[in-house]
Image (cartoon, rainbow, N blue to C red):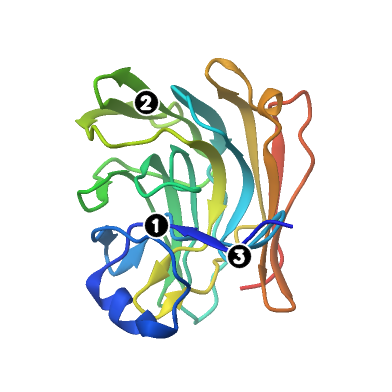
Amino acid sequence: MRTTRRATALSAALLATLGTAAPAVAVTAPAIANGTVHNLHIHLRNSSSSNWSGFAATGGGFTSISASWVQPTGKCTSATSYSSFWVGIDGDGSNSVEQTGSEVDCSGGSPQYYSWYEMYPAYPVNFSNTVRPGDHFTGSVTFNGSGKFTMKLSDTTQGWSRSVSKTYSPAQRYSVEVIAEAPSSSTGVLPLTNFGTVNFTNSLANGQPLGNYSPDQINMVSGSTTKATTSSLSGGENFSVTWKHS
């Protein structure tokens, strides 16, 4: 049984919303883009999170994480919803985040596709490059020493690649993740876009199969509702996440 913990980059508005009733956990500076928060991670119990589904390994000393995935199609109704798919260092048991990924949100009944990176303590930044369903992505975050990180995202279908280097010396490099997420706002976790199934492949930590680090297999659960499920790892590198509920 894992104790409740939160590793996140929160806005002042979200802190105010949480108030004194919130768990006694560490929180950090704002990191919000388009009114949503990436990487708000709330473990409810072992292998369960209110907004993450995928695999996360902890223990420290991580220098890189990488994985590939195919951008899923958002199946939209009239309701507004959100989903993101990313790789990252930190964010699970530490107060910094270094991440990059893609997204599909639903607004006005239509899917909106884009990609982004986030490097604490700055706000998330959206890339301007075209993203379409079915695009093949490869994402990586690499520690270069002296607090320097490189976040790289490539869309091999569209033929573009973006690489961003930033420095944050206090980063602990405590965890690595390959995740499908329901982003959050100041009111909490947002409805999850129906993305069907997203397949992650070639998940490598420190250049080795992620499975070598005994990662936690996380399902997304809110109360009694299972929102997304994570398959077992195949070959230590490959798995899928399947949407169940918004």
Q: Is residue 113 left or right of residue 180?
A: left
Percent x, y for residue 53?
A: 63, 53
In primary-sequence order, the first of circles 3 and 1 is 1
As helix, strand or loop, the secondary structure at mark 2 comes to loop
Question: Which mark identifies residue 8?
Answer: 1
- Cβ atoms at labels 2 and 1 below 8 Å apart: no
- Of residues 239 and 25, the one nearer the viewer is 25
Q: Residue at x 32, y 75 (%)?
A: 14
As helix, strand or loop, the secondary structure at mark 1 comes to loop
Percent x, y for residue 148?
A: 25, 25
- Of residues 121 and 184, the one nearer the viewer is 121
Q: Residue at x 38, y 80 (%)?
A: 18
Quarter of the rendering occupied by the C terminus = bottom right
Mark 3: amino acid: Asn
Percent x, y for residue 235?
A: 77, 23
Question: Which mark identifies residue 90?
Answer: none
Q: Nearer the viewer, mark 3 or mark 1?
A: 1
Which residue is tagged 2?
A: 159
Q: Nearer the viewer, mark 2 or mark 3?
A: 3
Measured Cα–Cα span from mark 3 to mark 1:
24 Å
Percent x, y for residue 3?
A: 63, 60
What crowding class fits label 3: few (fewer than 14 Cα within 10 Å), some (14-19), or many (20 or more)? many
As helix, strand or loop, the secondary structure at mark 3 comes to loop
